[in-house]
Image (cartoon, rainbow, N blue to C red):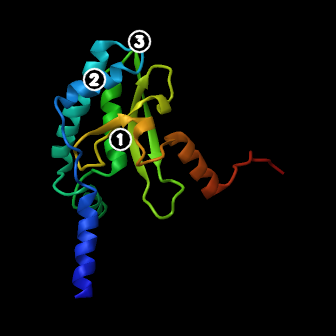
Amino acid sequence: MIRIMAAMLAFATLTACAAPPPSTGNEVQRLASEILSLGPDVDPEEANRASQIAYSYTAQLVQEYQITDPPLIHNAKVNKGLRPRGLCWHWAEDIERRLKQENFQTLELHRAIANADNPFRIDHSTAIISRRGETLYDGVVLDPWRYGGVLFWSPLVEDTKYEWVPRDAVLQQRRVEQYGELLPYVSE
C-alpha cells in the first residue's frame, strides 16, 4: 500500500508540472504587445513577427520532438534515446536560432540558465527576447519546455519560478570548476 501511495504521489508530482497556464484571449497578440512594451523604439512589425514565430515554431517543434508527455517524462525519453530532442536546452537553442534568422533590428535574443548552482534541481535553459541593446533582465522569457510544448512567456522580472542567469556566465563558471583557471603554457 505504501508503494502504491508513493507511486501515485510521484506520478502526481510529475504531471503537475505539465499543467499549462490558462489561456486568456489571443495569446499571440498578447505576446506581441508585451514585446512592443519593451520600449518605444521596438518596431511593431518586428514584435508581431517575433510573437507569431514564437508560437508557430513552438507548435512545429512539438511535432518534430514528438511531444506526448509532460516535460520530465519527455526528458527521460530523450535521455534514453526514445525521442530525438526536447530537453529544455533544445527548445531554447532551436527557438533562439529560428528567431535570429529574422535579423531583427530593434530586438535582441539572449540565453539564460536557472538552477545551475542548485544541486537539488536540474538546470533549466530558456531563450529571452529584449529590446536591442538591453540585457536579458529587461526581456521576456520564451519557454516552450515548461509546459510541454505550450509556450510560456513572461517578463523576466515577473518569472518568479526561476532565477535566470546569463548562459555564458554559467558556462564560464562550469569551465572554471572543471578545469580551474587555465594558465598560459610556459616552456622550460
Q: In the rendered structure, which disc, 1 or 3, sits on the residue that comes first in sequence?
A: 3
Q: Disc 2 on helix, strand or loop?
A: helix
x then y, percent, for residue 36: 34, 19
Query: Which-is-in-front pick, marks 1 and 2?
Result: 2
Disc nearer the start of the sequence (1/2): 2
Question: From the viewer's perspective, is the residue at label 1 or at label 3 nearer?
Answer: 3
Question: In the image shown, does 110 or 131 lie closer to the viewer?
Answer: 131
Does the residue at mark 3 contact the one at mark 2 (Cβ under 8 Å)?
no
Separation of marks 1 and 3 at Cα, in angstroms: 27 Å
Residue 32's tag is: 2
Q: Label 3: which residue?
A: 40
Residue 92 disc label: 1
Q: Is residue 66 visible?
A: yes
Viewer-side residue, 114 vs 88: 114
- State the residue at coordinates (24%, 53%): 84
* Quarter containing the N terminus: bottom left
Q: So how many labels did they put on this image?
A: 3
The answer to which quarter of the image holds residue 78 is: bottom left
Residue 143, x across and y down, in percent: 32, 41
Residues under labels 1 and 2: Cα distance? 19 Å
Upstream in the sequence, badge 3 or badge 2?
2
In percent of width and height, residue 164 lies at 48, 43
Q: Amino acid at mark 1?
A: Ala
Q: Nearer the viewer, residue 1 or 88?
A: 1
Amino acid found under the numbered disc labelled 3? Pro
